[in-house]
Amino acid sequence: MKSRDLVLGEVVRRGVAKAYDIAKSMPYSVSTVYYLLSRLGAEGFVENFGGLYRPTFRGVLRYVEVWGCDLHVVNVVRGMVGGGWGKALGEEEVCEALVFLSKFRPYSRDLAPALFEIVWDGGKLAELPGSVRRLLAAVAASVGGPIDEMHSGVLLGRLFIGHCSQCGLSVKPCQYIKL
């Protein structure tokens, strides 16, 4: 196991942490952990905000690739979704989506752009697992906005991606949108 993957694993398991706190739980010196965090940051796997490190979505996908999916990574992703929409996703469906998405290496670090990058590069939406479509809908409901009194998300032509009060989280043309 690479030392940087061990440090990334610790960042994901903690969600947000100081380098010193990470180093205390690792078999490495503080300077080594700072160096590894710097490398992970340059590679797009972690971000540093005022001395606090947190995983990026790229880092989450790397974690799943190395360690598999667990409740730590599920909670990190639910927090990334924002707007409370992450709570609408079950643990198993988040894991299913992350295992599928971990096969891709997005350029973007943040959840929404990386997810849209993967989905649109990967082909037809209808061919994606339902868990990936629901994750995409939760993200769109969070980063999009209200379309009308029943819908929050984004419209791409006639395709609705987001939350419908009648259909729930969905990625499909919605009969309830009055255009």
Image: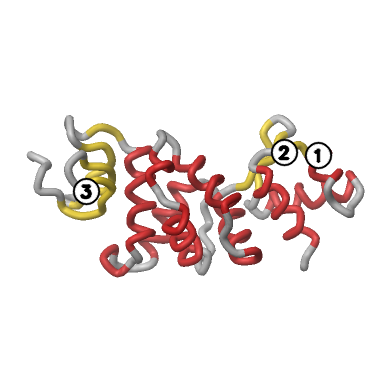
Neighbour tally class for label 3: few under 14, some 14-19, many 20 plus, Cα within 10 Å: many
**Quadrant in the picture for residue 131:** bottom left
Dot 3 or dot 1, earlier in sequence: 1
- Callout 1–callout 2 Cβ contact below 8 Å: yes
Residue type beneath disc 3: Phe
Expressed as whole percent of the image width and height from the top left, the position of residue 99 reads 50, 65
Closer to the eye: label 3 or 1? 1
- Quarter of the image with the C terminus in it: top left
Residue name at image x 28 percent, y 47 percent? 169
Distance in Å between CA atoms under marks 3 and 2:
37 Å
Distance in Å between CA atoms under marks 3 and 1:
43 Å
Distance in Å between CA atoms under marks 1 and 2:
7 Å
Which residue does the numbered mark 3 point to in the structure image? 160
| In the image, residue 99 above or below residue 53 | below
Q: Secondary structure at mark 2?
A: strand
Residue name at image x 54 percent, y 45 percent? 75
Residue name at image x 58 percent, y 57 percent? 70
Residue type beneath disc 2: Ala
Neighbour tally class for label 1: few under 14, some 14-19, many 20 plus, Cα within 10 Å: some
| In the image, residue 52 above or below residue 107 | above
Q: Secondary structure at mark 3?
A: strand
The total of numbered circles placed on residues is 3
Marking on residue 17: 2
Q: Residue furthest right?
A: 29
| In the image, residue 99 above or below residue 16 | below
Dot 3 or dot 2, earlier in sequence: 2
Relative to residue 89, is residue 53 drawn left or right?
A: right
Which residue does the numbered mark 1 point to in the structure image? 21
Expressed as whole percent of the image width and height from the top left, the position of residue 118 reads 43, 60
